[in-house]
């Protein structure tokens, strides 16, 4: 009995898949005129009128008559920019390329497209992370450990003049990684170097930490 039920389920699934027709994109639809197909793609635009709703999937118009619109959940107007799968007969040659949808089960979100989009995003994220790891490996140790942020273009540091002031050092070296105050002196840390200034802002010494 159980085996018979299993065979019946497989038969029903196979019949449903056959009834859905081949999966085609909007670019492939022209070659399947007057055939039963499952059109897959993203809804580029949605139009509403007294006659019903029209979803545009590529060059194919998906027509939902007003008489059956209320049976669709969610409302077809909410499918803008969503991936869908539409099952129906394409119009024959000589007529505008379209599918008329009469049953709610023939218009649904295309979950396979959502999975594909998610996988593509994951692949792009992994590529970006790999590039960040590669670029970080080219930084000097003092940049990585000291937390210095480099700009898009590295410029060579010019030698500072004698008796440099705190202002000229900040202008030349940029934002320090750390600032220390002690007994009227101020220390600016650049990576592993300690730049010490007196209370008037004159440079006293530059020493490794």
Image: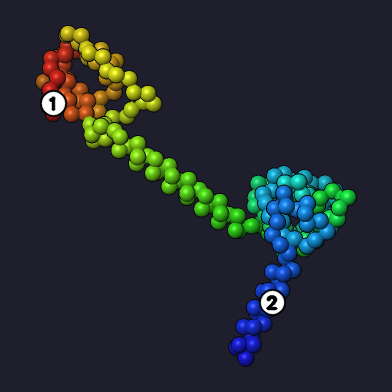
| SS label for mark 1 | strand
Q: Is residue 90 left or right of residue 107?
A: right
Residue 86 quadrant: bottom right
Q: Quadrant of the N terminus?
A: bottom right
Q: Nearer the viewer, residue 148 or 47?
A: 148
Please tell me whether mark 2 sits on a helix, a strand or a loop: helix
Q: Quadrant of residue 35?
A: bottom right
| 166 shown above or below 73 | above
Residue at the far bottom in the pictured view: 1
* Residue 105 horizontal side relative to residue 191, left or right: right
Q: Percent from the top left, x then y, of residue 140?
A: 25, 32
Which residue was labeled with disc 2? 12
Real-space Cα distance between discs 2 and 1? 78 Å
- Provide residue 77's location: percent of width, then percent of height: 72, 49
Q: Which mark, residue 208?
A: 1
Query: In the rendered image, is residue 53 in sight?
Result: no
């Amino acid at each position: 009995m159980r085996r018979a039920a299993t065979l019946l389920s497989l038969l029903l699934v196979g019949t449903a898949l056959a009834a859905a027709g081949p999966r085609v994109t909007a670019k492939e639809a022209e070659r399947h005129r007057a055939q039963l197909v499952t059109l897959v793609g993203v809804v580029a635009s949605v139009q509403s009128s007294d006659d019903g709703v029209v979803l545009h999937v590529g060059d194919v118009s998906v027509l939902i008559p007003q008489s059956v619109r209320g049976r669709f959940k969610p409302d077809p107007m909410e499918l803008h920019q969503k991936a869908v799968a539409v099952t129906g007969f394409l119009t024959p040659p000589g007529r505008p390329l379209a599918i008329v949808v009469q049953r709610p089960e023939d218009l649904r979100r295309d979950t396979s497209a959502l999975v594909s989009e998610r996988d593509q995003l994951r692949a792009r994220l992994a590529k970006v992370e790999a590039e960040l790891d590669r670029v970080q490996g080219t930084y000097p140790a003092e940049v990585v450990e000291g937390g210095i942020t480099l700009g898009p273009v590295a410029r060579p540091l010019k030698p500072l003049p004698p008796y440099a002031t705190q202002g000229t050092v900040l202008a030349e070296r940029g934002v320090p990684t750390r600032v220390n105050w002690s007994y009227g002196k101020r220390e600016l840390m650049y990576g592993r170097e300690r730049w010490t200034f007196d209370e008037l802002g004159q440079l006293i010494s530059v020493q490794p930490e």
